[in-house]
Amino acid sequence: VTAVPENFKPVSVPHAPFLFRFEFSDVLTLKFFGVFFTFLFTDIFDTIGTLMGVAEQAKLIDEKGNIPNVKNALLADAIGTVAGACLGTSTVTSYVESSAGVAAGARTGLSSVVTAGFFVLALLFTPLFALVPSCATAPALIFVGFLMMQSVTSIKFSEITDGIPAFITILVMPFGYSISKGIAFGMIAYVISKVAGRKAKEISPVTWILAAVFVFALAIKAI
């Protein structure tokens, strides 16, 4: 399934990076704020969803469902996002594929440092790694999905107002190819379900605000 091109050379020099090449012409325009909110909410909730999945796999969540030192984890992700943008890369954020590493025993973060080192070496062997087909990496993603699905057993599907939003969240994530989209639609569905089920008192003020923000963000994308 892999076609090796003619005159193939496994080693190549990386392209010159786009260091600090900022574009200020669209700042404070409608387009700017649309992109800003899109990346903001995508990054925030992709990261939160990833943290929950990875922390669950690592058994780091306490009895109340909280993640210890979550502030530091979010700060590290935010620094990576800003630094990546300044260095001209695509948005740097945490990936749920990390749960595969956690399942293999990674806990302290040293594995991430080693992985980063291998990525630096991979810059010199881009043509070689480009030959790896998607069918070779798919099993790893299937295993990640399997690890994440284990948490579904803790959802109370007997309570419809909880089960339906959870189902919508799980459904939208793969079809929308985005953790943040799954959380957004799930949050909106949660509010609608609770109101329809005459259990609006169970909706916290923060959930109301987030649902409104998600509706606003989806409306901006639609425009």
Image (spheres, rainbow, N blue to C red):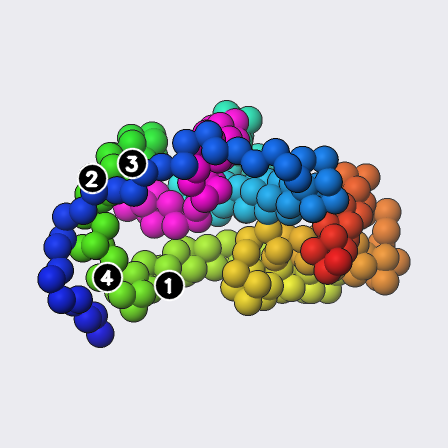
Q: What residue type is labelled 4?
A: Val
Q: Are marks 4 and 2 in contact (CB under 8 Å)?
A: no
Mark 2–mark 1 distance (CA, rounded to whole Å): 26 Å
Which badge, 3 or 4, comes first in the chain's sequence? 3
User: Residue at 61% of width from left, 57% of height from top?
Assistant: 182
Query: Which disc is residue 132 wearing?
Result: 4
Q: Is mark 2 on a helix, strand or loop?
A: helix
User: Residue at 21% of width from left, 42% of height from top?
Assistant: 13
82 is within the stretch colored magenta: yes
Spot occupied by residue 123 in the image (x, y as percentages of width and height): 24, 42
User: Which residue carries the number 3 mark?
Assistant: 116
Q: Do the residues labelled 2 and 3 touch (CB within 8 Å)?
A: no
What residue range appears in magenta? 75-104
Which badge, 2 or 3, comes first in the chain's sequence? 3
- Front-most of residues 221 and 117: 221
Packing grade of label 3 (10 A; few <14, some 14-19, many >=20) is: few
Query: Which disc is residue 142 wearing?
Result: 1
